Each structure stands twice: as structure tokens, then as C-alpha cells.
Image (cartoon, rainbow, N blue to C red):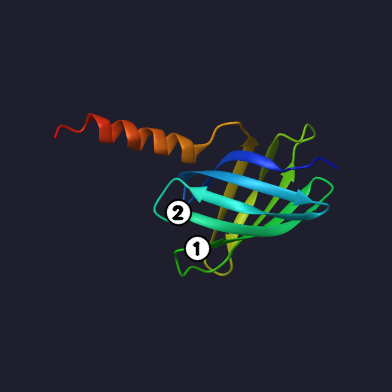
Amino acid sequence: MTDLSGMWLGTYWQRETPTRFEATLIQGGNALSGSILDDGYLGEARLSGTVVGRQVQFVKRYLAQSLPPIDYTGTVSEDGDHITGQWSIAGFDAGPWEAHRSEDDLSASWQTFRAKALISVPG
């Protein structure tokens, strides 16, 4: 079984509109937990779920929004570096998602961008 622990970059599509996200996954045995940072107004979420073979299932819950939980299912590629699947909000909406392993860190990139923007502001 591939260990999914680490940084992942991904995209989910809602009504054909893509939203990028960064996920930090922590796997212990079949248990999966971690955090997700959406590149949008919804912000940070926590996840918890399971990994069985190449099948992944987790529930995403946003921290700052009173939104229903979002169920994710997916299949891990044979090399363990890519996941594709479907997300759904019970009775409301659903769509595809995908993620791949990455050393990139959107949080660090955002902090660097903000620091540069603050430096370049005339004042």
C-alpha cells in the first residue's frame, strides 16, 4: 500500500468551474487525516477518512464556513503520485477532482506574494 502522507496539489470542479487546492495528508495504516487550503474564499478545511488498497475516501469540513460536509472518493494511480475521483455534497452538488504529489506549498507562495506586494506599495 502506498503511503499518501505529504503535500498534494489538486483541482476540483463545481459546475465546470475549477478551484485549485493544496492538501497536506497524513496516513497512519488505513486512516487518513489532514488539511486542505482552497485557492478561493472558502479557505481551510480538515479531512478525515480511509485508504484501502488504491481506494481513498474522506470527508472535508470547512473551518470558517457553516457548510455541509463534502464526501470525496478517489483512486490512487499505480505509482502513488496521482488521485482522481468524485466529490459530493449530499442532495446538493457533485463533481470531479484530481490531485498530484507536490513539493510546492501554496501557503508559502501566498506569503511570499503578500510580502512582495507590501514592499512594492508606495507609501
The residue identified by callout 2 is: 43
Q: Residue furthest left?
A: 123
Is 25 left or right of 112, judged from the image as shown?
Answer: right
Is 121 left or right of 54, judged from the image as shown?
Answer: left
The front one of 106 and 79 is 106
Residue type at the position of mark 1: Leu
Secondary structure at badge 1 equals loop
Residue type at the position of mark 2: Gly
62 to 29, vertically: above or below: below
Count of marks placed on residues: 2
Quick one: label 1, few (<14), some, or many (20+) residues within 10 Å? Answer: few
Q: Residue at x 48, y 68 (%)?
A: 67
Give the Cα distance between marks 1 and 2. Answer: 8 Å
Residue 11 image-quadrant placement: top right
Secondary structure at badge 2 equals loop
Rendered location of residue 64, percent (x, y)? 45, 64
Rendered location of residue 87, percent (x, y)? 60, 55
Residue contact between numbered discs 1 and 2, judged by CB atoms under 8 Å = yes
Is 5 left or right of 114, judged from the image as shown?
Answer: right
The residue identified by callout 1 is: 63
Q: Earlier in the sequence, mark 1 or mark 2?
A: 2
Quick one: label 2, few (<14), some, or many (20+) residues within 10 Å? Answer: some
Residue 113 image-quadrant placement: top left
Rendered location of residue 2, percent (x, y)? 81, 40
